[in-house]
Amino acid sequence: MQKLKTLIIKVIEATQRAVRPFFIATPSLSRLYYLLFDRAFGYEQQAILKAIIQYEARLGMQDCSSSLLRRNIHRLEKGLIMRPRRDIFALDYIEETVLVYSRSVDVGKYEHSDLAWAYSVLQEFFSVTDLEHPIINASFNTFRAVNFKCEGMSIPYASSKRTKHDVSAKQFKALCKSRRSVRWFEQKKVDKSLLIEALTIATEAPSACNRQAFEFMWIEDEETKQEAVKLPGGTAGFASQIPCLLAVVGDLSAYPFERDRHVIYIDASLASMQFMLACETLGLSTCALNWPELHKLDKRAATLLNLPQHKRIIMFIAVGYALADGGIPFSNKKTAEALLKHVESKKA
Ligand SMILES: Cc1cc2nc3c(=O)[nH]c(=O)nc-3n(C[C@H](O)[C@H](O)[C@H](O)COP(=O)(O)O)c2cc1C
C-alpha cells in the first residue's frame, strides 16, 4: 500500500515537472496550474478575502486601533510637509479620515497617543487649509463636534529637531556582529519588563503608511508554549528548552486591497529585526523561527493561539539568556560588494 502511495506521488510530481513550462506562458495559465495541481495558495487567498470583508465591515478599525486612521493621518502629514505645500489637499480622503477619527474617539479604550496624534494633525491641517472649500468645511465641522482634546502637538517637525543619538557605526556594527541566532538557553525566566523595553524599541521601526498592522504574541503558558514551539519545523532538537516564545502575527484586515498582502511580512520583519537587536542590548538573545506557508500547520497554530484566519503568523522568535557554552553556527555573511548590484542605464 505504502509503495503504491509513493509511486502515485512520484507520478504526480513527474507530471507537474513536465507540464510546468507550459503554465508559465501567462499569469492566467499559472493560475490554472495552481487550480489543477497545487492548492498551496488556497488558504492564503481565503485569508485575504476574509480580511477584506473584515476591513469593510469594520471600516479600517481593529479592536482598539485603526490602521485606516494611522494611514490617513500619515497622508495628511505628508501633505503638510510637501514643498511647495498646496492650499487645498486631501480632498479625496479627508471626510473618511474625520469619520474614522470620530469613531476611534468613541471606542473607549482606543490608544490615547494615536488619538492625540490624529487630533493634532487634523487641527494643523484645518489651520492651514482653505476652510471655505465645501468638502473641507464639512469635515472641519465634523472634527469640531468630536469630543476630544489633548495637550501638546504631535505634528510634523524639522529634520534638525529629530532625536539625537551617539551610536557610532563602529558600535552599531559591533552590536550587529554580536547578535547571532542563539538556540541554547539558560533555564531562566524572561521578565515582561525586558520584553516591553525591547518592544518599545521595535515600535520605532518604519511601516508602510505607518499602519503597524502586526503584534508580538507572548506564549506565556508553559503547556501552550511546549506545543507551539514544536510547530515550526526548524526547532527540532532544541525546542523544549526555549524559555520564552513569541509569535509575530500580521493582521491582513488592515488592508482593503489584495495589492497590500505582503505588507504585513515586510513591516513585521522590520520591527522584528529591531526587536532582536534591542534584546541584545538588554542581555537577551534570540532566534527567529521560520513559519512555512502550510495551511495544515497554520490551522493548528491558529487553534492553539486563538487566531482568526486574517491574522497570519509571520515567524516565531525564541528569546532567552544564552547558555555560555551553547554552540553558535558560524553562518558566514555575504560581502557588501556582493549585495550591491549596479543597475545598468537603459539609455544608450
Ligand atoms: C525568517 C527566519 C527564519 C528562521 N528560522 C529558523 C528556524 O526555524 N530554526 C533555526 O534554528 N534557525 C532559524 N533561523 C535562523 C537562521 O538560521 C540564522 O538567522 C542564519 O543562519 C544566520 O545566522 P545568524 O542569525 O546567527 O546571523 C531563521 C532566521 C530567519 C530570519
Image (cartoon, grey):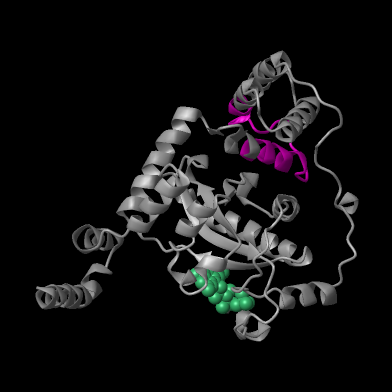
In the image shown, does 167 or 99 lie closer to the viewer? 167
In the image shown, does 218 or 291 lie closer to the viewer? 218
Is residue 319 placed above or below 312 in the rendered structure?
below
In what quadrant does ligand 1 lie? bottom right
Magenta span has 41? no
* Residue occupying image coordinates x 22% and y 77%: 17
Q: Does residue 6 show up?
A: yes
* Residue occupying image coordinates x 23% and y 73%: 20
* Residue occupying image coordinates x 63% and y 20%: 106
Is residue 87 placed above or below 102 in the rendered structure?
below
* 28 lies left or right of 312: left
Q: Which residues are magenta?
A: 71-97
The quadrant of the image that shows the N terminus is: bottom left
Is residue 304 placed above or below 235 in the rendered structure?
above
Q: Which x, y percent locates residue 343?
A: 59, 77
Q: Which x, y percent locates residue 164?
A: 90, 57
Location of residue 23 by image quarter: bottom left
Location of residue 110 by image quarter: top right
* Residue occupying image coordinates x 50% and y 42%: 255
Q: Which x, y percent locates residue 342?
A: 61, 80
* 326 lies left or right of 172: left
* 141 lies left or right of 305: right
